[in-house]
Amino acid sequence: MTIHGEGDLKTEIAERLRTFVEDEVAPHAARIDRENAFPEDIYRKMGEEGLLGLARPQGAAMSTLEWAMWVEELAAASATVADIVCSADLVALILDEHGTQEQRSMIGPLLAGEAVGAFALTEARAGSNAAAIETVAHHEGNSYVLDGAKAWITCAQRADWAIVLAKTDQAAGTRGITAFLVERGGFTNGERPYDTMGQRGTAVGELHLDGCRVPEGMTVGEPGRGYKLAMKALDTGRIGIAALAVGVARAAYEAAVDFASRREQFGQTIASFQGLRWMLVDMATDIEAARLLTHRAAQLKDTARPYTTQSAMAKLRASDVAMRVSVDALQVHGASGYSRDLPLERYVRDAKLTQIYEGTNQIQREVIARQLLG
Ligand SMILES: Cc1cc2nc3c(=O)[nH]c(=O)nc-3n(C[C@H](O)[C@H](O)[C@H](O)COP(=O)(O)OP(=O)(O)OC[C@H]3O[C@@H](n4cnc5c(N)ncnc54)[C@H](O)[C@@H]3O)c2cc1C
């Protein structure tokens, strides 16, 4: 296995990442998927090894580009683990950029793998239209009281705390949404994590807030600025999801090349048939293009230039590539690809989610259209 774009990564850390993925993640990917169980040991070890929040100053202070390479590498072994890392890094980013000193003190335990955080925007009736959230926060004395329920929240069932978006002013539209840091106890969960199709084991589920009292000091950023904060964070989050999608696509492609080079039909390897050769070439070309878009968005962020359009483009293209490549890679395997004994069907299931979360691909097109056309 090679870290893609390795030249840009410090050799020592690249070596550490490679070893970690090979020894600690890849051997457990199938089990995590089968059991739909949060990978506690891996999460803790990533914390111990300093592999969470790699782009945070409290972590390894890597560039966004290097972080994207790490996410790709992880996802090629386990999309579930990569998604958990992306979720942790998203909440660490939000606290780092908008949190008070007290709130930022939560980043240390998170990056050490001792605590799990969640980002809670989506609700049962507010998905793509995030501005329609119905969770409310009423100001009472020195506190806010939150009521509502969040759905489809990564790490919800396992989270020690969550950044929760709630309406503090019903009449103010997106300017009436505020972010809160809510600790477990303030919220409860549904009975069990959702039984998802792919990226299983992320403890995705619900957060219920029933008269949850939060001190005033636990608003993240200023009251009324939560929606903007969330959209800005998702711009970065989408670079991570794009990298994750590239990782899944790469794993599927590499498996297809390996299989096609070994499998013989009609007295020759199936890799010698033009129909399959061109399929593999198209996969490799699509992956390279998706990776370049992802790295371009990361570099724009690293050089403090606008990157909303490019991160949406990267997420849009990379997730479509992951879907197409994983389906084609399964096809290259014939019947073997259809068996649960090989990871091809998992790659297809894992890839599908990248077209849905952090804004569906229809919404990515809307984001891009708004930037290009107003
Ligand atoms: C496994 C998983 C993990 C997730 N993790 C998190 C998390 O950690 N935190 C969080 O807050 N959320 C999370 N989500 C929620 C995710 O971001 C939403 O599911 C997503 O934004 C889509 O919302 P929805 O499912 O309600 O679909 P809907 O908004 O109901 O959309 C249904 C369909 O209509 C399309 N559609 C909607 N509006 C438009 C439009 N204007 N133009 C064209 N098409 C449109 C959509 O593209 C989609 O195909 C997660 C979801 C999943 C599945």
Image (cartoon, rainbow, N blue to C red):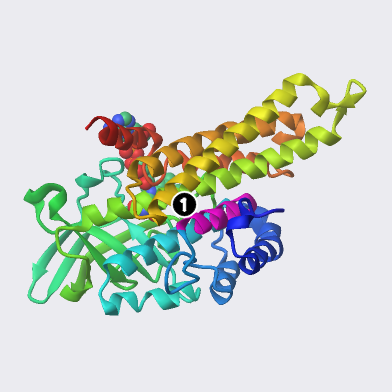
Residue 170 visible in image: yes
Quadrant where the C terminus is found in the figure: top left
Three-letter amino acid code at the position of disc 1: Gly
Q: State whether residue 13 is above or below residue 354.
A: below
Judged left or right of residue 218, residue 333 is: right
Q: SS class of the residue under badge 1?
A: helix
Task: Report crowding for label 1: few under 14, some 14 to 19, many 20 or more residues within 10 A (C-alpha).
Answer: many
Nearer to me, 222 or 188: 222
Q: Which residue is mark 1?
A: 240
Task: Compare residues 102 and 353 and report the one nearer the observer.
Answer: 102
Query: Is residue 237 rendered to the left or right of residue 75?
Result: left
Q: Residue at x 90, y 25 (%)?
A: 268
Residue sitting nearer the eye, 201 or 257: 257
- Residue 65 in magenta stretch: yes
Q: Residue 200, percent across and down?
A: 54, 52
Q: Confirm if mark 1 falls within 8 A of ligand 1.
A: no
Q: Is residue 147 magenta?
A: no
Residue at image position (53%, 44%) is: 245
Going 30% across and 37% down the picture, which residue do you hit? Answer: 367
Quarter of the figure with residue 308: top left
Q: Is residue 210 above or below residue 257?
A: below
State the predominant SS element of the stretch in magenta.
helix
Lateral position of residue 109 relative to residue 122, left or right: right
How far from the left and from the top, in percent, is residue 189? Answer: 37, 62
Residue depicted at x 30% and y 61%: 208
Q: Which residues are magenta?
A: 64-78
Residue 253: percent from the left, percent from the top? 67, 38
Task: Write down which quadrant ligand 1 falls in.
Answer: top left
- Total marks drawn? 1
Say if residue 35 shows up in the picture. Answer: no
